[in-house]
Amino acid sequence: MILMKFALVNGTKETPSPKKYGLCPFCNAKVISRCGTKKSWHWAHKAKVECDPWWENETEWHRAWKNKFPEHCQERIHKDEKGERHIADVKTDEGWVIEFQHSFIKHEERESRNNFYKKLAWVVNGNRRKRDKAQFFKLIEEQIVISSTPKIYRVYLDDSALLRDWYHSRHPVFFDFGEDNLWCLIPSSEDSWGAMIEVPRALFISFHTRLDPTEEDFNGFLNGLKSIISKYKTRQIEAQQDYVIFPPKYLVYRSRRTHRSRRRL
């Protein structure tokens, strides 16, 4: 059963209130308000229907995140050039789709969403499994800092179950551990490592609810980070090339000594 925050009541997008009926904005089926005390008030389909297969029922974590954005941006239907439609958790006025992911998602479905939404940011609940938070922060303590301003970490993706779940994402992934800052996995190439940066929760929200058009936008923020990572990779490649052309002196010395020893034999 799909649970939703909004339904159409007499053609108007409304939140649930007791003893109300409406229509699902996506499939146009009848929905009924559920206004109990155990769950956040929501709309539920009156009968079992085929609605959006990508839709994940809301948790309190979902609802809290969606409430940080204007209502007209929440639960918006996104349609691609082929006519395929899905409900986006949040779609901003600048066209960014934000998907809040609490439960496990299969790689194939994640890739389908990555391909469907061209401008996408994931927000992932890092507290779903008890071990993930401790494992993640232990990993961060042991990593190399590749940039000090802003502070960007190089992390090996196989060293954390949470990062393995989101291996080689082509869109930014923000992990929410319930603290003031989110941790962003920055999209990168097919390397064994990824880049992580700590991003204030308030900054992430302000990127997508911009009131001042002179502020840096989300796309500019991401491009700046990608530029720093690209320069770091270039330096790494150049350092490896220098190592091959000019090996350390002790390796040259050992090579010559071995050569002389063989001549004596």
Image (cartoon, rainbow, N blue to C red):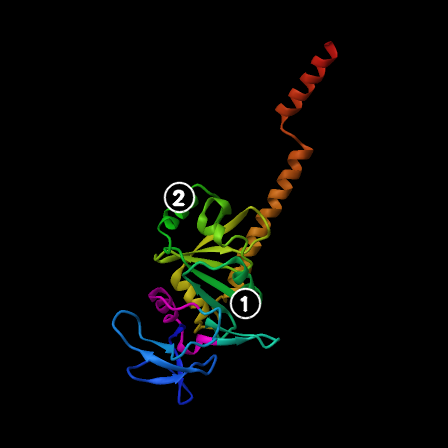
Give the position of the C terminus as an image quadrant. top right
Q: Does the magenta stretch include residue 28?
A: no
Helix, strand or loop at label 1? It is: loop
Relative vertical location of residue 23 with respect to residue 200 in this rendering, above or below: below
Q: Which residue is the site of mark 1? A: 119
Task: Check disc 1: other Cα within 10 Å, few if <14, some if 14-19, many if 20+.
Answer: some
Query: Residue flagged by tag 1: what amino acid is it?
Result: Lys
Region of the chain picked out in magenta, as a range:
56-76
Picture residue at 47% right of the left edge, 72% below the top: 88
Task: Give the farthest residue toward the bottom.
Answer: 10
* Vertical relation: 123 (above or below) 39: above
Q: In this view, does 261 lie to the left or right of 190?
A: right
Q: Name the residue under label 2.
A: 138
Q: Residue at x 43, y 81 (%)?
A: 24
**Was residue 57 drawn as part of the magenta stretch in this picture?**
yes
Query: Which numbered disc flags the more N-terminal residue, 2 or 1?
Result: 1
The residue that appears at 38% across and 66% down in the rendered structure is 62
